[in-house]
Image (cartoon, rainbow, N blue to C red):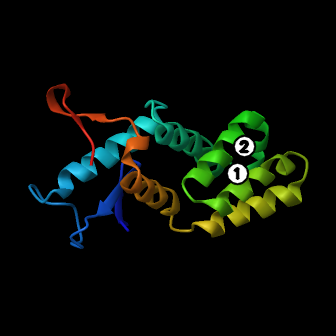
Amino acid sequence: MVTLNRMVAGAPRIQGASGKSGPAGPGSGDDLSMNVIDEVWKRACAHRGGGVGDRHLSALLLVHGAMLNGGAATVAVGFDPEDLRAAVEACEYFGLNGLANLFREIPAAADSEDDERRLDTLFRDMDPEGIMLPAAFEDRYHTTPEDFAPVAGPRGLFRTL
């Protein structure tokens, strides 16, 4: 299992398999791993990437970001049911079943301030440190990197972990 060690520009940073804290050092093998993880994350933020993992990460980031910035009522009125279904499927893909259940309840926040407050509180309490999503992505990427499109490296070379 990989552990989060810091966040840079919204992209995940992990502690390398070596267990060393801090950024991975040149030549350690962790540089490539970190760069690929960062690039896949950034690509999903831009809604690019053709793999099933890319599509799930992108769908999840879209709704998750709206929850962080506007809360359940904003998501309830600002997203189509198919966007919410895609986010629920993405949560399940990444093993975030509690978050999937919360996203299923979001339409109730459009009609009820009590539901809105309850879901906002539940969301905040679910991941107070903000590491749940990056950690789930990293775990899934390391388990099934083939689910994500390759990342172009220098001079157009493709790389995966």
Q: Nearer the viewer, residue 89 or 76?
A: 89
Vertically, is 140 above or below 126?
above
Nearer to us in this view, 116 or 36: 36
Tag 1 and tag 2, C-beta contact below 8 Å: yes
Residue closest to the eye, 24 or 10 = 24
Give the residue drawn at x 73%, y 57%. 102
Q: Name the residue under label 1.
A: 71
Residue 104 appears at what percent x and percent y? 77, 51
Where is residue 85 shown, x and y percent of the image?
Answer: 71, 41
Nearer the observer, 130 or 49 = 49
Q: Which residue is identified by label 2?
A: 75
Residue 100 — which label? none
Q: Residues within 10 Å of mark 2 (few under 14, many from 20)?
A: many
Question: In terms of secondary structure, where does tag 2 sit?
Answer: helix
Answer left or right for 76 relative to 17: right
Quarter of the picture containing the N terminus is: bottom left
> Where is residue 79 drawn, in percent x and y?
72, 36
Q: Please state the horizontal and vertical placement of residue 91, each as a whole percent of the image.
A: 61, 52
- Few, some or many residues within 10 Å of mark 1 (<14, 14–19, 20+): many
Q: Residue furthest top?
A: 156
- Circle 1 SS class: loop
- Furthest residue toward left: 27
